[in-house]
Structure formats: structure tokens, C-alpha cells
Amino acid sequence: MERGPNQEFGSRGATVLISLTVREGREDDYRRWQQKVDQAAGGFSGFEAAEQYPPTSDEQNSWSVVFRFSTIDQLTAWLNSAERQELLAEGDELFEGAAAQEILAGEPPTRDVVTAVVSHDVRPGRECDFRHWQNKVRKVQEKSPGFMGLELFEPVPGVQEKWVAVFRYDSRAHLDEWLESETRAKLLEEGEDYFAGYDVRKIRSAFGSWFRFDGEGEEGVPSNWKQAMTVLLALYPTVMVLSLTVGRELGAAGLPGYLSLFIGNVLSVSILTWLLMPLVNKIFAFWLVPGPARVAVTNLAGAAAIVACYLLLLAIFAWVTA
């Protein structure tokens, strides 16, 4: 949920961001281990999603993992579970130093392109002053190029003791410009009266592997509304064709519904990731990542073309299923 400068911070849902420094040469072992962790988390009540963010060139093999649960209690149950503790002990040799962990009790950002997660050790008794200082930072930050939003998450007693600020920019360059700016340095110097220390971590946007263009970095990630429209364009015919073909065959074979649905999802994701999304990205590249000239006209033309494709697909499947 995107919030403006004067909106209250939400309290729904729970997200944990875990940062790990993987030993050099153990990256493949780490990926296999992380896959086991993700699968284990998926078996716990309230699990919604897990995302993994590999290091960028300047992050010295620092990986970030995000887990999303429906409630803070469900997230805490997973974090404190015996199953997770066993997995942590199993993977201990893969990492250098202890993992850093921030828990965010509230809705996750929904328009991320590049996100910074900043955790603060607020001095006891200075919480109110820290909040006022953070509001001052927000007002200044809103004027910086590429700023998209900021959310402040208060500590969760017994689970997360740090205050965490999450802010978003439209490109890695704009985020780095703010983080390295003299303006921010002066604000941090002022804030030293209110917090004893802070830590910054950067993560990238969701749907990253479905939206990458040759030669482009973070600036090549399309807007989320374009991602949603494009995914729907590829997803709808995929689901319809599978339902009319594979779905009927699986039903006729007597497979239970939950197993048929799982097989259908595996096929859908595979078709989207390796066939349709690359094709759709190539066709609509002019619209997904438009050049600097005539952006408004390009956005309108691309959106109209997508809607026309929707209508065509609806007409085709209406005729097929009649």
C-alpha cells in the first residue's frame, strides 16, 4: 500500500528481510540450501511468498531473502520453529558472520523498483524525537530525483527491536545519489542524537526475471502496471488452453483436484517464464521501456494494443467454448 507523507503506517501482514554474506565459491551450495529453506517455509501456516535477491557488483556476495506471512504471529512461528533452526545449523558453514534480519509488520511496498531498507538502533527515550526526525528526512527526501515513497515500521516487541525505514526510487542511480548526497549526510549527523547506529540494505523489484532487457540494469524494469498488464496478456491464454486440454485429460484420468491444479500451475509458470513472457517482452519492448521521446503517446498506444489483445482473446475463447 503506497502511502503519502501524512498517512499512518499500516499494521497488516508481516515481512522479514534477511541479509547473508555467502562464502566465496559456495554460491551453488547456498542456492540449494536456500531452496530447502523456501520449501520448508511454504509448509507453514500464513506463508505468502519468498523472494531471493543476489548481490550486485558492489555488495561483496551479500544476498538478501524476503519472506512474507499473513500475520506477525505466523511469521514468528516460522522464525522460531525447530525446523528452521535445524536448517540454519545445516547451512552455517556457507556464511561469513551472522545474518542481519529486519522484520516489517505491515503491508509490503507495492511499487518497488529499487528499495532501500534502513534499520535504526533508536536510543531509549528518544523514540518521539526519532519519529519527528524521520518525518523531516521524508520531507527533504521527497524533493530528491526518482523518489517514489517511504514507509516507517516501528519495533515489534519481542521480535524486532529496531525501527526500519523502507524507501523506494525509480532507479539504482537515483537511490545511490540520495544515499551518497551531502544533504542526507547532514541529516544523519543531526539524527545521531536519536539513534546509536543504522544499517542500509538494497533490494530490487519483484518480477525481475520476467522483465529484463538486453544491456539494461535497474532502469530497464518496467512500471508495475505495465508488468501486470503484460503478465495478464500471457497468463490468460495459457490458463485457458491448459484448462481446455491438459485439464480435461487430467480430470478424465481421475486425478484429484489439488494434484491437477498443481500440475497445471507447473505448466503455466514454465510456459510463461521460458516461452510467452520473453516473446511478449520482445513484441512490447517499445512500450515496456520507452525512450525519452513521446513517452505519453507510446504509453497510450501500448496500453491500447494490450487491451485490443485482451478483447481478441476473449472473443476467441468465447467462440471456442460456445
Image (cartoon, rainbow, N blue to C red):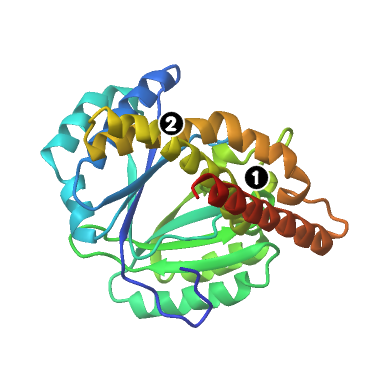
Q: Nearer the viewer, residue 23 or 2?
A: 2
Is 271 drawn above or below residue 104 in the view shown?
above
**Residue farthest toward the bottom in the current orientation of the protein:** 6
Residue under numbered circle 1: 218
Where is residue 41 shown, x and y percent of the image? 25, 40
Is 31 drawn above or below residue 73 in the view shown?
above
Q: Nearer the viewer, residue 262 or 130?
A: 262
Type of the residue with mark 1: Glu
Quick check: 191 left or right of 210?
A: left
Is 165 drawn above or below residue 322 in the view shown?
below
Residue under numbered circle 2: 267
Where is residue 213 shown, x and y percent of the image? 70, 37
The residue drawn where x is 88% and y is 56% is: 293
Q: Nearer the viewer, residue 188 or 299?
A: 299
Q: Nearer the viewer, residue 226 or 76?
A: 226
Where is residue 97 shown, x and y percent of the image? 33, 33
The residue drawn where x is 37% and y is 35% is: 247
Quick check: 174 left or right of 245?
A: right
Neighbor class of circle 1 (other Cα within 10 Å; few <14, some 14-19, many 20+) is some
**Residue farthest toward the front in the current orientation of the protein:** 322
Pointer 1 or 2: first along the chain: 1
The residue drawn where x is 15% and y is 35% is: 83
